[in-house]
Image (tube, rainbow, N blue to C red):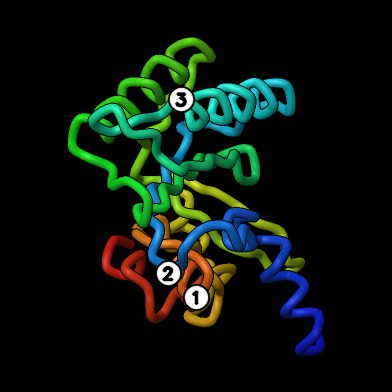
Amino acid sequence: MTPNDNKMTLKMTTPTLTTNDAFSPDSRVWVYVSSRPLTADESAFVQHNLDAFCAQWTAHNHALKARGEVFEGQLLLLMVDETQAGASGCSIDKSVHFLEALGQEIGADFFERMRFGWVDSAGHFQLNAKPEFAQLVQSGQITPDTLVADTLVQTKRQLMEKWLVPFGKSWHKRLV
């Protein structure tokens, strides 16, 4: 794999929210993990609903500049540019209730925290439950250099710069 191949892999495994220049690098980001992969139809349905939610999302009667993304059919990302209006506790609660209801509608839980994303040797994004992930580490399929997704990023800047980190330098290592 050449350095350019690696850049292409990273671009393909990085959420498109990172390329939205209309949002400040300091925009807040939340990453939600689905309990199961979504079908193409479910992904389209969820994306449509995320778009509709973001278009009407408010905090203290002020419209929030927000975007959402279904990533790899398994992660949901929300981003709010707080340079116009900040997300308040109530507005964040609205997003959580929205995602809970949306998940119930399609039979998925978007609050699964023990599923880990990583990039395999072919450059494909994978998501595994903690026991499967631990087995992949033990078998050597996931090495200290394997890129893993940091679902704890909190800003667009972190999403751009620290979305994929080597397993050996990630918080995931402490859990397996």
> Dot 1, how many residues are within 10 Å of its Cα: few (below 14), some (14-19), or many (20+)?
few
Q: Is residue 115 above or below residue 138?
A: above
Task: Please provide percent x and percent y for residue 58.
Answer: 35, 30
Between label 3 and label 1, give the one nearer the viewer.
3
Task: Please provide percent x and percent y for residue 63.
Answer: 39, 34
* Disc sitting over residue 115 in the figure: none
Confirm or deny contact between disc 2 and disc 1 (CB under 8 A). Answer: yes
Q: Is residue 136 above or below residue 161?
A: above
In the picture of the structure, the residue carrying the numbered disc 3 is 56
In the picture of the structure, the residue carrying the numbered disc 2 is 158
Which of the 4 quarters of the picture holds residue 59? top left
> Dot 2, how many residues are within 10 Å of its Cα: few (below 14), some (14-19), or many (20+)?
some
CA distance for labels 3 and 1: 29 Å
Closer to us: 112 or 86: 86
Residue type pointed to by label 1? Glu
Check disc 1 and report its element: helix, strand or loop: helix
Q: Which residue is situated farthest in the top direction here? A: 105
CA distance for labels 2 and 1: 5 Å
In the picture of the structure, the residue carrying the numbered disc 1 is 161
> Dot 3, how many residues are within 10 Å of its Cα: few (below 14), some (14-19), or many (20+)?
few
